[in-house]
Each structure stands twice: as structure tokens, then as C-alpha cells.
């Protein structure tokens, strides 16, 4: 990092650029997640569910604020970041528009999990200060118990839904990987940042493989085979 | 309070009942405010405005969570509290449905201010522990600067709106007082709690007079005469 040597090198500058851009991308993702949860809250079947989804949405705004403060400290503009990066997240959400409350709950749980995988993968490739930010954002995700209870309760009452909801859960993974690759393809600075530590172009595909394994566990958590 | 004497008296029990009910009413109010801000966010003219209203909505959920924890600690049920008390707040919001983003901003600022007046009036009539809760809820309201800037900017660009927006701001006060009186009329425990300290039936009308004075100042803050 720049602080550790008297004269910042080109690679220091590239690292700083990559981190700033990464925070901008993550912030746009939190904003998109908030916006979608708000839209999906209209499907909530009762007051308890509306409160639960409101808490999830507010947690996303908490992450957003954390990233906004960091981005501003680095000279970035949170509003511009949304304008620059929200489209790819909106495309993901548009391609995975839940048709029922239970699809929305599966998406919230699976999406939170995929985001946590991504953040975890990020965290150990970042310098200490940036890692602390990403871990802070990750630490707060956790309305999982509610989503699991909702989905398992529904499956117990209507076992016939297991098939279609399992397909839905699988589709979410495919769409998430597709859209994440679009981000990586478009943002070299971010890709370099994420995979520099490995010095290995196959690191990207190994990352997506490990995400698939963890996705299978989350499907089992929800009672989907 | 019950803790301060060996045998709880009937008035201790009434006080505890009043405080629990008050927290339930306030919590329903925060939930209603959140729900309305979410609905009104669809009118936001740009990304910065959408972010600002999302932050306001999340702040309401923060207050909601604070009150929910207190209510649960007293044996209450936040979800039931919403069911019991949200209607009067929904009637207020239904009677003051903004037709434009600027009406929504005025309502957010005026509504936040009226809530703060009410909380302040409450705070000094409550025992220490309950007062700390109410002050905690009050302390976090504060997205005022954004609303003021939005309304003043619009008035500078379109001075012809000053008349209709002033009428709108006045109507908000009238509706808030009407609906607050409905709550007080329906909930004797809460009314007793609020005005016991004064031993004076005119205290209610003096409270509403002082609210009117502060409302006039807030109208001036917004550039409305």
C-alpha cells in the first residue's frame, strides 16, 4: 500500500483504484438489493413477514451507509457509484423476479449467502483496512433464520412445491454467476484486485466451483434437494 | 415504580400498563411511517433523493427495533402492537397522502418535527428508564437538512408553489392533531400517563398550543409562510 513506502508505485495506485472501484460496485449492489426487497415486500403475507423484510431492507441500507462512508473517504461519490454500477445488479434482479413470497424468501437467503461467499473470498485478498470494511459489511447479513423457517414451513404444508422451488433455487445460482462474471469482465481493476494473490487465471473458475458447493448446502438448509 | 416499594400498588401497575401501551402505540407509529416512506419513495426524482428517503425509512426501522426490544422486555408483542394500533396512523397517512415529491418532503419534515414534539413532551413525564427509551428514539430523527434543501430549492425555482405548499403544510398539522386526539381518546392508560404530572385537564390543550407554535417555526424553516 501507498502508506508503507515513501514513493507510491504504479502497483500501489492500481491497488487503491481497484479498492475504490470495488467499494463502488458493492455499494451499488447493496442499493439494488434494498430496492428489490422493498418491491418484494408487497408480497409479504402478514405483518410479521412485512416486519422481517423491512429489517432485511434496513440492514442493506446499513451496509450501504458503511460503504458510502468508505467511498467518500477515498474521494468517491456514492450517488455516482449507483449510476455507474447499478445496471448489472438490476439485470440480475430483473432476471430473477420472484413470483411468490416463498420465491422471494429463497432468493433473499440464497442471495445473502452468495454475497457472503463473495465477500469472504474478497476479504483475504485485501489489505487490512479494506478487509475490515468488507468484513463489517458481511458481519451484519443475518436474517437467515426467518427465511429458512418460512420456506420449510411452506414445504411442510405443500410438499408439491419442492420441485418448482428447487428449480428456482438452482436458477438463482446460475443467474448470479452469469451476472457476477459480467461485472468481472467489465471491470479489470476489480478482477486484478480479486485474483492477483493467486497469480493464476484458473482462480476465477475455482472460486465459482467453491460457491457451487456452498450453494448446495444452502439449498439443503432450506429443505430443497 | 414497582421496584421502589416492597408491595406494588395499583398506581404502579397503572403506570407500567401505560408505559407498555405507550411503547406499543409508538412502535405502530414507526412502522406506519416506514411503510409510507417506502410507498412515497416511488416519487423520488433522482438517485440522490431515493437514497435520502431510503435512509429516512431505515431510521424509522431503527426506532422500531429499539421500541420492539423494549416492548418484548415488558412482555409485549411487537407484531400484535402493530395489529392493535397501526390503523389510526394509517388513517392519518391516508388523509395526508402527498401528491408530489415536494409534498412528501414537507410531510417528512413536518411529521418528524411533530413526532419529536410529542416525544419531548412525553419524555419529562416518564420514569427514568422509560424516558431514556423515548429519548433514544427521538435522538435519531434527523434527515431534516435534506428535506429543507429540497423544498427551498423547489420554491426558488417555482415561487408559485409557495401558496399551495403552505396550505399543505397547515393541513398536516390539523390532521396530526385530529388523529393524535383519537389515540388519546381511545387509550385512557396512555392519556393518564401523559398528563398525570400536571393534574390538570387543560394540559392536553396547552400541549397542542405549544405544538402549533413549533409548527410555525418549521414552516418558516421550509420557506413556507
Image (cartoon, coloured by chain):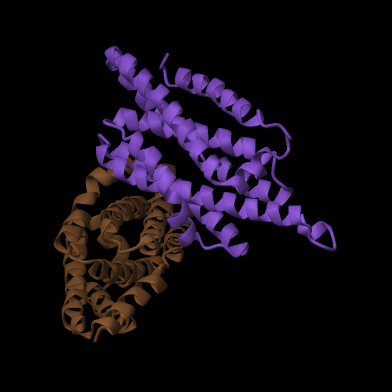
Chain colours: A brown, B purple
User: On the rendered structure, is B150 left or right of A36?
Assistant: right
Residue B52 in view (yes/no): no
Give how far across and how far down residue B42 sits, in percent. 26, 42
Give how far across and how far down residue B163 sits, in percent. 33, 14
The one nearer the camera, A36 or A114, is A36
User: On the rendered structure, is B2 left or right of B67?
Assistant: right
| B225 lies above or below B132 | above
Give how far across and how far down residue B90 sits, in percent. 38, 44
Q: Residue at x 57, y 59 (%)?
A: B71
Quarter occupied by the C terminus of chain B: top left
Q: Residue at x 43, y 50 (%)?
A: B86
User: On the rendered structure, is B91 left or right of A101?
Assistant: right
Q: Residue at x 23, y 82 (%)?
A: A158
User: On the rendered structure, is B174 left or right of A207?
Assistant: right
Quarter occupied by the N terminus of chain B: bottom right
Give how far across and how far down residue B20 sits, in percent. 61, 55
Q: Quadrant of residue A11?
A: bottom left
The one nearer the camera, A26 or B10, is B10
Q: Quadrant of residue B99?
A: top left
The one nearer the camera, A9 or A180, is A180
Residue A176 in view (yes/no): yes
Q: Residue at x 27, y 12 (%)?
A: B160
Residue sticking out furthest to the right: B6
Amino acid at each position: 500500500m501507498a502508506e508503507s513506502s515513501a514513493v507510491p508505485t504504479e502497483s500501489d495506485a492500481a491497488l487503491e483504484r481497484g479498492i475504490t472501484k470495488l467499494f463502488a460496485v458493492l455499494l451499488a449492489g447493496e442499493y439494488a438489493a434494498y430496492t428489490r426487497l422493498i418491491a418484494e415486500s408487497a408480497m409479504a403475507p402478514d405483518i410479521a413477514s412485512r416486519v422481517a423484510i423491512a429489517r432485511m431492507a434496513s440492514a442493506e441500507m446499513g451496509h450501504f451507509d458503511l460503504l458510502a462512508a468508505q467511498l467518500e473517504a477515498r474521494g468517491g461519490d456514492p450517488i455516482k457509484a449507483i449510476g455507474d454500477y447499478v445496471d448489472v445488479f438490476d439485470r440480475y434482479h430483473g432476471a430473477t423476479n420472484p413470483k411468490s413470497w416463498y420465491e422471494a424468501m429463497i432468493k433473499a437467503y440464497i442471495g445473502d449467502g452468495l454475497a457472503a461467499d463473495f465477500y469472504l473470498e474478497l476479504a483475504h485478498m485485501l489489505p487490512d483496512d479494506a478487509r475490515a470494511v468488507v468484513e463489517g459489511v458481511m458481519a451484519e447479513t443475518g436474517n437467515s433464520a426467518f427465511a429458512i423457517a418460512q420456506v420449510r414451513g411452506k414445504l411442510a404444508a405443500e410438499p408439491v412445491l419442492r420441485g418448482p422451488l428447487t428449480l428456482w433455487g438452482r436458477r438463482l445460482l446460475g443467474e448470479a454467476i452469469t451476472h457476477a462474471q459480467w461485472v468481472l469482465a467489465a471491470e479489470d481493476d476489480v478482477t486484478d484486485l480479486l485474483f492477483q494473490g493467486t497469480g493464476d487465471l484458473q482462480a476465477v473458475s475455482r472460486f465459482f466451483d467453491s460457491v457451487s458447493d456452498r450453494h448446495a448446502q444452502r439449498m439443503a438448509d432450506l429443505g430443497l434437494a
